[in-house]
Amino acid sequence: MYIKDFKGIIIKAFNSLDLDTNIIKALKDLEYETPTDIQIKAIPLALKKKDILAAAQSGTGKTAAFLLPIIDELIESNQENNNTLRALIIAPTRELVNQINKAIEDFARHVEIKKTVVFGGVSSTEQARKLAKGVDILVATPGRLLEHIRNKTVNLSSVQTLVVDEVDTMLEMGFLEDIETIFAQASTTRQIMMFSATLNQNVKKLAKEFLSNPAVIEIASQRSTVAIIDQQIIQVDPEQKSALLSYLIGSRNYSQVLVFVNTKKEADGLVEHLELDGLPASCIHGDVRQTARAKALRKFKSGDIKVLVATDIAARGIDIQLLPVVVNYELPETVTDYTHRIGRTGRAGNAGTAITLLSVKDYRLMQEIEKELIFSVKRDIIEDFEPTEKKPRIFKARKKPLSHVKSSRKPQGATKQDPKKQKKKKSTKTTKRDANRNFRK
Ligand code: AMP
């Protein structure tokens, strides 16, 4: 069956994807009307037990893309193999593990499926006890899973389907060896699916090593994810940022704001400031204990706190539907982190706002991000928060004629040029116009 979406594009409906009726029923309960791109492409292939390498960011519906076929298969084979570990999902952070676990609960609400999670930061005894009782699906972070493998509290020999979610993040976090060991342990696995925000060289290398003739799926490039989000850039001095943030939340009446910072220290300091301004806030970062993180997330979701301050790694895996506003308190260092951050809003086709508080030191980085993602955002200034920092001068290298390049090449052992002369020469080369041109909006 086919139906039309709001843009008039013909798309498949879930019941054309050959999924068990209990799953379709659950999707109806969850008010999922139509499958997303990644679901349309991945589900039929996954049901055919193909290995899959998919480039899909969070927010695209990738979790359902790998979970629905897994649950479908478990329903089909449950009679014989009840409570035998058949599906293993590895994810980089405990937040993402919990999110996937919750999605299993949602999608498998009308069927009997046993699942459990393992991740670090909490006691492993209770995890081992649950594993010993027998489960169908295990969702795990790599480090703690390895610990269970070494302690023989888990055995992967019966795993039929293995999913590695957010592979690029895992490799960035240094989990390569752990993943390889896990693959080796699950050597009889019949199907492997890898999901990653980007298919970089390292991801492709890992896929080549372990996947057998995989279907490669690439959907919604970083650019199109960015396109549905209203992006705003506000220029401000660094020391004014916290006051501006409180002002924006108050004056624009934002109900729920996720704020990204680059360091744990900054996260703690910002929460203190927001609280002093009367805005209930909490933070999640690597030093915040798992129970406190879960509590912060719960309070944020329920609306008890307005602002959640997070570092990139801790924020991976946070899923809050209809999150209206994301703030880049500091710019992240990579384009991938930028798209990951702002992808927290505007999820699954919903509108969202992403605000970047930009100070002079990040002007150039912001330009690079815009260039890479092919978009351009107008710079705003808020009254009473006007930036006073000087714009840095940008020295543009002029192309020299080849003859000049050759003749100016220093022979071996040449003495250093007089630094005063060098300086003088440089300053005559860059006009004020050159420098300003770099900051034109
Ligand atoms: P994910 O990319 O898996 O993190 O999913 C992002 C969000 O989209 C989650 O909140 C899902 O519940 C939601 N979602 C996934 N698939 C659909 C769908 N087909 N229709 C509506 N919402 C969906």
Image (spheres, rainbow, N blue to C red):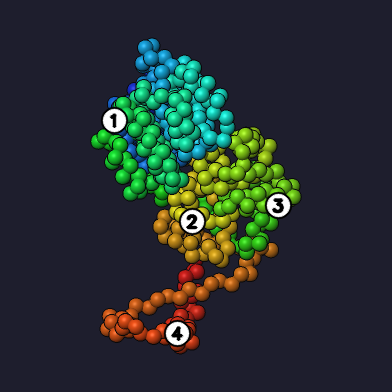
Q: Which comes before the other along the chain, label 2 or label 3?
A: 3
Closer-to-camera residue (399/295): 295
Q: CA distance from mark 2 to mark 1?
A: 36 Å
Closer-to-camera residue (200/173): 173
Q: CA distance from mark 4 to mark 2?
A: 32 Å
Closer-to-camera residue (394/143): 143
- Is ligand 1 closer than 8 angstroms to the Cβ of mark 3? no
Toward the top, the furthest residue is 79
Q: Which comes before the other along the chain, label 1 or label 3?
A: 1
Q: Secondary structure at mark 3?
A: helix
Where is residue 382 drawn, in percent x and y? Answer: 64, 61
Q: Secondary structure at mark 1?
A: loop
Q: Which comes before the other along the chain, label 3 or label 4?
A: 3
Q: Is residue 70 above or below residue 226?
A: above
Query: Which disc number belongs to residue 273?
Result: 3
Where is residue 92 drawn, in percent x and y? Answer: 47, 39
Query: Label 1 sits on what residue type?
Result: Lys
Q: CA distance from mark 3 to mark 4?
A: 46 Å
Residue tagged 4 = 422
Residue tagged 2 = 333
